[in-house]
Image: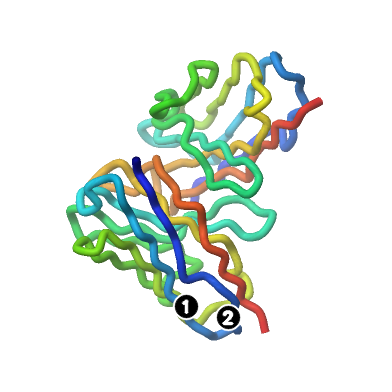
Amino acid sequence: EVQLVESGGGLVQPGGSLRLSCAASGFTFNTYSMNWVRQAPGKGLEWVSYIGGTDSTIYYADSVKGRFTISRDNAKNSLYLQMNSLRDEDTAVYYCARDPHSYGGPYYFDNWGQGTLVTVSS
Amino acid sequence: EIVLTQSPGTLSLSPGERAALSCRASQSVSSSYLAWYQQKPGQAPRLLIYDASSRATGIPDRFSGSGSGTDFTLTISRLEPEDFAVYYCHQYGASPWTFGQGTKVEIK
């Protein structure tokens, strides 16, 4: 069974930093591309970032480019999102989501974690 | 950026009725790279349909997707109690990859 478990969310002041993690199990992690998708309270979904499985391709939404960094550790079956210079508008539940392709994406998201809440507030 | 507009915003129906949800794109979605997700309160989204009309693993056949170009539809043939939720469309044909604002299907 595919499992994605996010952690690392919490309350942070504007301008602060946070590192999210996503622990993957139940599939061969290094052959799948991965994404972060967020959802502000009461709002819709917003794609944040993508990292390829078998290639090194990385993409970011314009809203986070230059502030967020996606990475992965295939030996630990883990995905990360380093978030710096956080703003009020970054407040959201952050989901890690699997792309069923190993490269060329992002495509659609076939498995999602339960999400971790990031609250940016003074 | 491709803007996806979902309609209606809210659909009020009874169990057993048919639901038709629309997703209209501001530009043509290449290769029909459009997906549909279901989200219930407090839960993560769940993939229903990809490539406009392919059902994801384990999705009941009462869910079907259709369309191409700029007009796409998610149809639920007979609503079951567990189908009342919010539905999002998502295009992955062009960067930036975008979602619609969602359609809530509520019990009438």
- Mark 2 and mark 1 in contact? Answer it, CB < 8 Å: yes
Q: Residue furthest right?
A: B108
Hey, what amino acid is under mark 2? Val
Seen from the viewer's position, the closer of residues A77 and A54 is A77
Q: Earlier in the sequence, mark 2 or mark 1?
A: 2
Q: Position of residue B16 (x, y in %)?
A: 69, 14
Image quarter of the C terminus of chain B: top right
Give the secondary structure at mark 1.
strand
Q: What colour scheme has been applied to the protein in the rendered image?
A: rainbow
Distance between mark 2 and mark 1 Cα atoms: 8 Å
- B75 on left or right of A103: right
Chain identity of mark 1: A
Please tell me which residue is depicted at 72% across the width and 37% down the height of the picture: B9
Q: Position of residue B101 (x, y in %)?
A: 63, 45
Q: Position of residue A1 (x, y in %)?
A: 34, 40
Residue located beneath label 1 in the image? A18
Chain identity of mark 2: A
Residue B30 position (above or below residue B2): above
Please tell me which residue is depicted at 56% across the width and 60% down the height of the picture: A93
Q: Which mark is residue A105?
A: none
Dot 1: within a 10 Å radius of its alpha carbon, few (fewer than 14), some, or many (20 or more) residues? some
Residue A88 position (above or below residue A94): below
Give the secondary structure at mark 2.
strand
Residue located beneath label 2 in the image? A12
Seen from the viewer's position, the closer of residues A52 and A7 is A7
Q: Quadrant of residue A48?
A: bottom left
Hey, what amino acid is under mark 1? Leu
